[in-house]
Image: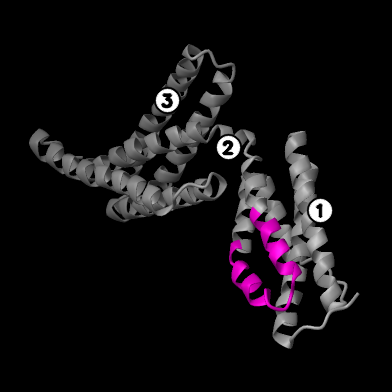
């Protein structure tokens, strides 16, 4: 069965048809390696719905299309690296922008209202999919990340003026960072055990790994720049802090439907504020203690 629509509507339909097919293939590919039978079933159901929408749009265009390989590769890789929940929700965010196009089609395409309703129901199905291990331990990762950012940012900023030597600053930061990593991980382990949780070891591992990776990222500028370039290293370190906070906050905002701006401003404000205070503490400590390195 074929339909007659305006050239403008046909152009929108072609775009949507391509998108539905591509997303159907993405869901199918992610379902192959997603853990949990419920997750697989939900992904395959979404793939089936997208495929059905593709067939509806095909009755208007009369064209058989192929999925966009670049988009399929992008979201499949994101799902493997950052988790299927993040990848799928990021993709679904793009469908929110399509609602304007559905409104344009409403007068000419009767099925557009039903397809729009189906797309909105996707979000509810996705919320039920939040049974991914890495998301269960986001709290542990946030604990390690926040503590490392605040504690080590302050320590490195304080060391910067007190020591004025990037190698000494990096050495001091490494000692503090590794010690704090074990301290933080063991505290998380004991806290989980006291709550009677069976996943205490896994929980503390997520906390420790998040802390250690943050330590490495923050110390890197002091190792890569010249020995006397401690101010430049400090500025680079603060930029790394902002990037880490922005990246992690964006990840949680997409995967767990949390607000981005307020959480980013809060975390960045605390970390940079502590760094500024610690920098001046280092200046005062150097002058009052009379230490000259």
From the top left corner, tell me how far across and down residue 183 is, in percent.
41, 22
Position of the N terminus, as image quadrant, is: bottom right
Residue 5 left/right relative to 237: right
Q: Earlier in the sequence, mark 3 or mark 2?
A: 2
Residue 181, picture quadrant: top left
Q: Which residue is mark 1?
A: 48
Badge 3 marks a residue whose secondary structure is helix
Residue 96, picture quadrant: bottom right
Q: Which residue is mark 2?
A: 135
Q: CA distance from mark 1 to mark 3?
A: 45 Å
Q: Which residue is mark 3?
A: 184
Q: Would you call the spot at circle 3 few (<14 residues within 10 Å), some (14-19), or many (20 or more)?
A: some
Is mark 2 in CB contact (under 8 Å) with mark 1?
Answer: no
Mark 1 or mark 3, which is nearer to you? 1
Mark 2 or mark 1, which is nearer to you? 1
Badge 2 marks a residue whose secondary structure is helix
From the top left corner, tell me how far across and down residue 57 is, in percent.
80, 70
Magenta span covers which residues? Answer: 96-120
From the top left corner, tell me how far across and down residue 25 is, in percent.
80, 57
Badge 1 marks a residue whose secondary structure is helix
112 part of magenta stretch:
yes
């Amino acid at each position: 069965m074929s339909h007659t629509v305006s050239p403008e509507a046909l152009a929108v339909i072609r775009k949507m048809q391509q998108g539905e097919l591509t997303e159907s293939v993405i869901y199918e590919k992610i379902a192959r390696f997603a853990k949990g039978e419920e997750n697989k079933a939900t992904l395959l159901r979404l793939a089936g719905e997208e495929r059905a929408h593709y067939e509806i749009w095909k009755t208007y265009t009369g064209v058989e299309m192929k999925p966009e390989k670049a988009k399929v590769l992008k979201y499949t890789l994101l799902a493997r690296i950052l988790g299927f929940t993040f990848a799928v929700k990021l993709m679904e965010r793009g469908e929110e922008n399509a609602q304007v196009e559905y409104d344009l089609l409403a007068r000419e395409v009767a099925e557009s209202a039903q397809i729009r309703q189906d797309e909105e129901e996707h979000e509810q199905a996705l919320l039920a999919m939040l049974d991914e291990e890495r998301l269960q331990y986001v709290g542990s990762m946030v604990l390690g990340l926040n503590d490392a950012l605040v504690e080590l940012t302050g320590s490195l900023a304080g060391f910067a003026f007190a020591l004025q030597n990037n190698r000494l600053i990096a050495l001091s930061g490494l000692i503090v960072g590794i010690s704090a990593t074990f301290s933080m991980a063991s505290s998380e382990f004991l806290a989980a055990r006291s709550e009677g949780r069976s996943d205490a070891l896994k929980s503390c591992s997520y906390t420790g790994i998040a802390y250690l990776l943050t330590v490495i990222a923050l110390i890197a500028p002091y190792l890569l720049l010249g020995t006397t370039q401690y101010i430049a290293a400090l500025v680079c370190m603060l930029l790394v802090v902002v990037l880490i906070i922005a990246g992690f906050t964006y990840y949680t905002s997409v995967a767990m439907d949390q607000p981005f701006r307020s959480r980013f401003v809060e975390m960045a404000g605390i970390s940079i504020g502590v760094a500024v205070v610690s920098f001046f503490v280092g200046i005062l400590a150097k002058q009052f203690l009379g230490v000259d390195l």
